[in-house]
Amino acid sequence: MNSLKWIKFFSISIVLSLSACSDKPEWVSIYNECKEQIQTSIDEIKQSPDTPQAMGNMMQSFGMSACEMIKNTCEQDPKGAACQSIVNSHKEQK
């Protein structure tokens, strides 16, 4: 598998970017953007003939788990240190 695609996938899993303009909590936009970016990257990766289907599925599961971690962390304690760290890290990436 192309190492550039691996780098892109893991970067997206960790580094989230979006411009959040909504009445919803900021973490909701971050979570939604995470899912969109993971799905876009997975679609690209799965199209590669070098990527076995099981590998693509595993990568999708890993990426979506990272997004779900954002959702679960911030739903449980939106003002807590962990959620605020996610939001602040996102702001720094803009």
Image (spheres, rainbow, N blue to C red):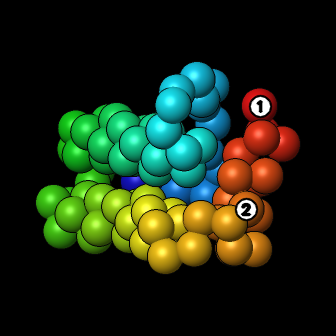
Rendered-image quadrant of the N terminus? bottom left
| Relative height, residue 94 to residue 39 (above, below) | above
Task: Decide if residue 30 is in sight here.
Answer: no
| Relative height, residue 84 to residue 45 (above, below) | below
Query: Can you give x and y, in whole percent of width and height, for residue 26 in the image?
Result: 59, 43
Who's the residue at 53% across and 56% down the image?
13
Side (left or right) of 5 relative to 50 = right
Query: Can you give x and y, in whole percent of width and height, for residue 53 in the image?
Result: 15, 60
The local crowd at label 1, few if under 14, some if 14 to 19, many if 20 or more residues have their Cα within 10 Å, is few
Task: For mark 1, give the secondary structure.
Answer: loop
The reply to whether the C-beta atoms of the residues labelled 2 and 1 are less than 8 Å apart is no
Label 2 belongs to which residue? 84
User: Label 1 sits on what residue type?
Assistant: Lys
Depth check, front residue: 12 or 93: 93
User: Label 2 sits on what residue type?
Assistant: Gln
Side (left or right) of 10 relative to 69 = right
| Relative height, residue 51 to residue 39 (above, below) | below
Task: Decide if residue 44 is in sight here.
Answer: yes
Outermost residue toward the right in this view: 92
Side (left or right) of 54 relative to 68 = left
Who's the residue at 53% across and 66% down the image?
74
Who's the residue at 48% across and 38% down the image?
24
From the viewer's perspective, is the residue at label 2 or at label 1 nearer? 2
Label 1 belongs to which residue? 94
Rendered-image quadrant of the C terminus? top right
Depth check, front residue: 8 or 29: 29
Tell me the quarter of the picture where residue 58 sits. Answer: bottom left
